[in-house]
């Protein structure tokens, strides 16, 4: 059963209201919730959508370069953990997928996301 999206997670009125992306530790410290424990609706409510990790890395590089594709290509900050992935692909992949293989993988992923196996 999915939990409804809430504006807060406060258990008592004397505590400050928490946002849906926050939780309070037993020590009273407020920290970000573990996204693995959030529903899809909660993640979407805070502005996230389902994307691949590779796409997330590419978007991070674009964010770092103020949205400029050319600057991402020119990046020389090789110590950045995202640097090898900045073009949106993994340099560690030993083989290239054909367009038909890519299409089949996308169909499989879509079926899995839809709950089919």
Image: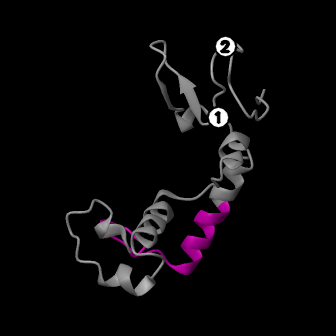
Q: Quadrant of residue 77?
A: bottom left
Q: Which residue is mark 1?
A: 19
Q: Position of residue 112 (x, y in %)?
A: 67, 50
Q: Quadrant of residue 2?
A: top right
Q: Is residue 25 found left or right of 17 in the rendered image?
A: left
Q: Quadrant of residue 3?
A: top right
Q: Position of residue 39 (x, y in %)?
A: 68, 37
Mark 1 or 2, nearer chain start: 2
Quadrant location, the N terminus: top right
Is residue 117 visible to the viewer in this orientation of the structure? no
Q: Residues within 10 Å of mark 2 (few under 14, many from 20)?
A: few
Question: In this rendering, is residue 99 above or below 47?
Answer: below
* Residue ranking furthest to the front: 14
Label placed on residue 56? none
Residue drawn at point x = 54 percent, y = 32 percent: 33
Which range of residues does the magenta coloring cover? Answer: 87-107
Residue drawn at point x = 62 percent, y = 65 percent: 106
Question: In this rendering, is residue 74 above or below 91?
Answer: below
Q: Which residue is mark 2?
A: 14
């Amino acid at each position: 059963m999915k939990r409804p999206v809430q504006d807060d997670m406060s258990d008592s009125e004397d505590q400050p209201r928490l946002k849906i992306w926050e939780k309070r530790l037993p020590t009273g410290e407020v920290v970000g919730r573990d996204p693995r424990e959030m529903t899809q609706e909660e993640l979407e409510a805070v502005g996230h959508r389902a994307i691949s990790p590779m796409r997330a890395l590419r978007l991070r590089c674009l964010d770092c370069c103020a949205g400029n594709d050319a600057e991402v290509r020119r990046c020389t900050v090789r110590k950045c953990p995202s640097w090898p992935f900045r073009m949106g692909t993994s340099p560690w992949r030993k083989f290239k997928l054909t367009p038909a293989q890519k299409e089949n993988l996308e169909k499989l992923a879509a079926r899995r996301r839809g709950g089919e196996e």
